[in-house]
Image (cartoon, rainbow, N blue to C red):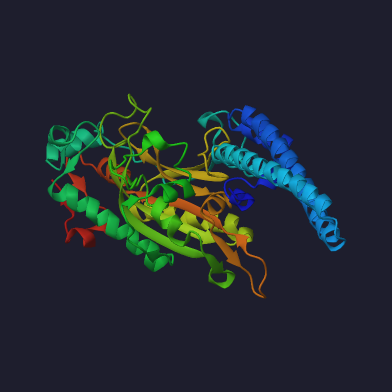
């Protein structure tokens, strides 16, 4: 494996030269730092092998010149003896090359399992209790009756059927019917229209099956293998857990022109997650499903612009909730609550009356060059300068099912009917109420 294969995951040189800082960052993420001890050992071994190989190469070059001189001088026996010595050196160099490849493979595997380094302004904390609220919008509605949850409302209206979904597929699936299905479709079209018309995103419709290379590029592999639904054939496909995977990989392996950045995509897709390790959590209703729909936002940016573009992406997602009149708050995640590939993440949480709390409806992450290194996504500035790694950002704009829940619960009436938010009525054929 060539050394250039290290142009993925974390920057090899950064890790080597900032071991203490990386160790502290991993501790803040609750990530075991013993991986770094392995890295130090493997890196020392690899450099030792390379140094010995380089020394042997110098000896071979010197011996080749000496053999030529001996042959010119007619000293054939001495020349043959030197040739035998060179052959031994070549055998040793081949052994060293194999050992170097093994060390590099081991380092590559190790680096693939290391998370991104948090940005300097991310709050340090062990879990979600250290998340920090940065803003809040809207006031939760005060009901003059006891608000119901989306399950009771949806089943009573005949727009939600979990029982038959379980019969067809199993737990954590749902069927939407009639106006409920139309509301889901209306939300998708509304979100796409806002992001394309108001915020300048280009709509794309990607494959819903992806290969292992794409999954590695957006860091679903190797860490989150068990969360995927795999297709059992020789091609190694998996159903997408989010449109982030195919859309961020759109320009994988390419060198883009700096003047074309930022590139902004939005995509509607279904998403499929096994929810491994989450059993017992959010089992009621549509909060945590194996199949759900999402409108995704993805950006490819210049490094110096990614922080500002991250703020814009987050407010682009928030705009959907503002237009729908749904109260929400935005929090910045702590080091211990942040996703594997993110350097900084904002969670947008919508108000759910039935739970009397805010629940996540979007995560908006700046991944820096972490994903770009994994998928070799680069750009070149004017003047023929050396290619650089781009920065990638992603966020939900929004999770459609959770938005459906929020509309149903926040716009419910005492008689069990649901008022359609005014901005959605044009997408619902003029329907003003589900009753």
In this picture, residue 288 sits left or right of residue 118: left
Please determine whether, in this image, residue 147 is positioned above or below residue 317. above
- Measured as percent of width and height from the top left, residue 303 is found at 62, 58
- Residue 258 place in picture, x, y as percent: 58, 69
Depth check: give the residue in front, 435 or 79: 79
Question: Which residue is outermost to the bottom?
Answer: 383
Question: In the displayed structure, does residue 141 sit left or right of residue 428?
Answer: right
Left or right: residue 94 compared with residue 371: right
Asked if one can make out residue 54 in the rendered structure from this viewpoint, the answer is no
What residue is at 58 percent from the left and 52 percent from the top? 369
Above or below: residue 394 compared with residue 258: above
> Looking at the picture, does residue 228 appear above or below residue 69?
above
Q: Nearer the viewer, residue 386 or 162?
A: 386
Quadrant, the C terminus: top left
Q: Tell me: 305 left or right of 354.
A: right
Image coords of residue 237 (percent x, y): 33, 47
Farthest residue to the top: give it: 280
Q: Residue at x 21, y 41 (%)?
A: 413
Q: Residue at image x 62%, y 33%?
A: 26
Q: Residue furthest right?
A: 73
> Residue 139: x and y, percent?
41, 43
What residue lies at 34% left-to-right and 41% top-to-bottom?
141
Q: How many marks?
A: 0
Q: Nearer the viewer, residue 155 or 354?
A: 155
Q: Could one spot residue 45 in this view of the protein?
A: yes
Q: Nearer the viewer, residue 165 or 182?
A: 165
């Amino acid at each position: 494996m060539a050394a250039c294969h290290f142009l993925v995951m974390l920057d090899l040189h950064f890790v080597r030269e900032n071991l203490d800082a990386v160790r502290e960052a991993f501790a803040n993420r609750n990530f075991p730092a013993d991986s770094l001890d392995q890295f130090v050992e493997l890196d020392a071994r690899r450099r030792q092998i390379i140094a010995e190989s380089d020394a042997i190469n110098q000896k071979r070059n010197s011996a080749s010149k000496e053999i030529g001189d001996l042959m010119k001088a007619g000293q054939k026996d001495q020349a043959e003896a030197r040739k035998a010595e060179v052959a031994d050196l070549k055998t040793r160099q081949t052994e060293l090359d194999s050992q170097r490849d093994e060390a590099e493979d081991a380092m590559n595997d190790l680096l693939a399992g290391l998370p991104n380094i948090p940005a300097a302004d991310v709050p340090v904390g062990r879990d979600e209790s250290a998340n920090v609220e940065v803003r809040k919008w809207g006031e939760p509605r005060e009901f003059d009756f006891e608000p119901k949850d989306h399950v009771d409302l949806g089943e009573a209206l005949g727009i939600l059927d979990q029982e038959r979904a379980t019969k067809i597929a199993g737990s954590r699936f749902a069927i939407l019917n009639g106006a409920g299905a139309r509301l889901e479709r209306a939300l998708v079209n509304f979100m796409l229209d806002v992001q394309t018309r108001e915020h300048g995103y280009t709509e794309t419709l990607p494959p819903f099956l992806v290969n292992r290379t794409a999954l590695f590029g957006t860091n679903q592999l190797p860490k989150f293998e068990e969360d995927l639904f795999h297709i059992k054939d020789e091609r190694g496909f998996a159903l997408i857990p989010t449109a982030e995977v195919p859309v961020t990989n759109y320009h994988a392996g390419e060198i883009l022109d700096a003047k074309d950045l930022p590139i902004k995509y939005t995509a509607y897709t279904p998403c499929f997650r096994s929810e491994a390790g989450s059993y017992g959590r959010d089992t009621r209703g549509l909060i945590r499903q194996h199949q759900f729909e999402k409108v995704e936002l993805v950006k490819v940016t210049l490094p110096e612009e990614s922080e500002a573009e991250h703020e814009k992406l987050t407010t682009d997602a928030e705009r959907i909730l503002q237009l729908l009149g749904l109260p929400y708050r935005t929090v910045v995640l702590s080091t211990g609550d942040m996703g594997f590939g993110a350097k900084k993440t904002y969670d947008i949480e919508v108000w759910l009356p039935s739970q009397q709390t805010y629940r996540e409806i979007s995560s908006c992450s700046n991944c820096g060059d972490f994903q770009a290194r994994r998928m070799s996504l680069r750009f070149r500035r004017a003047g023929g300068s050396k290619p650089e790694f781009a920065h990638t950002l992603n966020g939900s704009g929004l999770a459609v099912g959770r938005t459906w829940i929020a509309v149903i619960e926040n716009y419910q009436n005492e008689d069990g009917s649901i008022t359609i938010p005014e901005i959605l009525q044009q997408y619902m054929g003029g329907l003003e109420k589900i009753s």
